[in-house]
Image (tube, coloured by chain):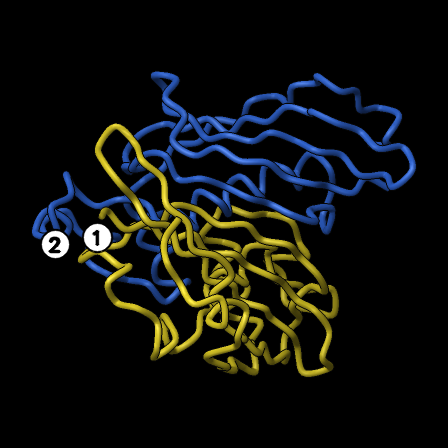
Chain colours: A blue, B yellow
Amino acid sequence: MTLADVEEGDELPIEELYLSKDAVRAYAAASGIAFARFTDDEGARREGLPGMIAPGNMSMGLLAGRLERWAGVGSLARLGVTFRGIVLPDQTLRLCAAVTQKDEGSGSVEVDVWMESEQGDRLVIGTASVKIA
Amino acid sequence: MARIDPALLERVFDTTEFGPITASEMVSFARSLGEQAACYVEPGPDLRAHPTFCVKFRGRKGFPEDFPAALLGPMSFDAGKDVALGEPIRPGDTVRVASSVHDVYEKTGRSGGMTFVVVRFTMTNQRGEHVATIDNRLMYRT
């Protein structure tokens, strides 16, 4: 893909993924945060949560991956996210993004990104800057 | 606006080093996100860390010792973060994390007052190259 292929207002194809509890546990282990809230339902309930949840950083990582599958490895320059809701495993999530600005001079593209549930609730929202060669 | 001594802002209150980073931990992290790109999951000369691998690093101390505890509620929530990326992390790299309080601000929402504390991690590698700057927004109900 080149910068010429990108237009402001473009929406990236939505990627759907099923987030399993085992995937959350694997992420928590790989990140050194294998706390009860990320690994088992009972432990999470003792913390006042409805069950085990996905770490916010995992949602951020999934969105980063979505952007790089579009713009290429090493293209992500900045990613900022706000965690708006709890992300529970055992559900299908949608990774979404739309181009908001294109700078021909720098080759930089600004993108809105968000992760939503099947019901359309935006659980994580943010913006990103990607460099397109 | 939350009252805070401006001298507390931007002052490095903790420095922690991690590493050397192994190929194995980089690959495990990338695989846990379902990554399939060879440069993230296949050990070799082209291996590099996933762009959000850096968020697993944090300083030993959460706040400066002289940070006013009255600003913080009993429970914090991870409200979000901003990551500005520099040089990719490669196997064998060391990551140095310098922590500072970047900002403190208040908001009022439907459920009441909130204080946000932005703790900045500035990360460099063993060559002094910028790896990432991460602004962590912690939210406390007040």
- Residue A33: where, in percent of width, then height? 33, 63
A110 on left or right of A15: right
Q: Nearer the viewer, residue B134 or A90?
A: B134
Q: Nearer the viewer, residue A112 or A55?
A: A112
Q: Looking at the image, is B96 positioned above or below residue B37?
A: below
Q: Looking at the image, is A3 positioned above or below residue A73?
A: above
N-terminal-most mark, 1 or 2: 1
The picture quadrant where one finds residue A89 is top left
Q: Nearer the viewer, residue B107 or A73?
A: B107
| Amino acid type, label 1 | Arg
Are the residues at dot 1 and dot 2 in contact (C-beta closer than 8 Å)?
yes
In the picture as drawn, the residue positioned furthest to the right comes out as: A105
Residue at (63% x, 37% y) in the render: A67
Provide the secondary structure element on which disc 1 rests. Answer: helix
- Provide the chain ID for the residue under circle 1: A
Q: Looking at the image, is B18 positioned above or below residue A108?
A: below
- Residue A119: where, in percent of width, then height? 34, 16
Q: Which mark is residue A43?
A: 2
A75 on left or right of A126: right
Residue at (54% x, 75% y) in the render: B98
The picture quadrant where one finds residue B75 is bottom left
Provide the secondary structure element on which disc 2 rests. Answer: helix
A18 on left or right of A36: right
Q: Which mark is residue B16?
A: none
- Number of other residues with Cα within 10 Å of mark 1, as a class: few under 14, some 14 to 19, many 20 or more: many
- Provide the chain ID for the residue under circle 2: A
- Residue B137: where, in percent of width, then height? 42, 52
Q: Looking at the image, is A62 positioned above or below residue A102?
A: below
| Amino acid type, label 2 | Gly
Q: Which mark is residue A37?
A: 1
Residue at (11% x, 46% y) in the render: A48
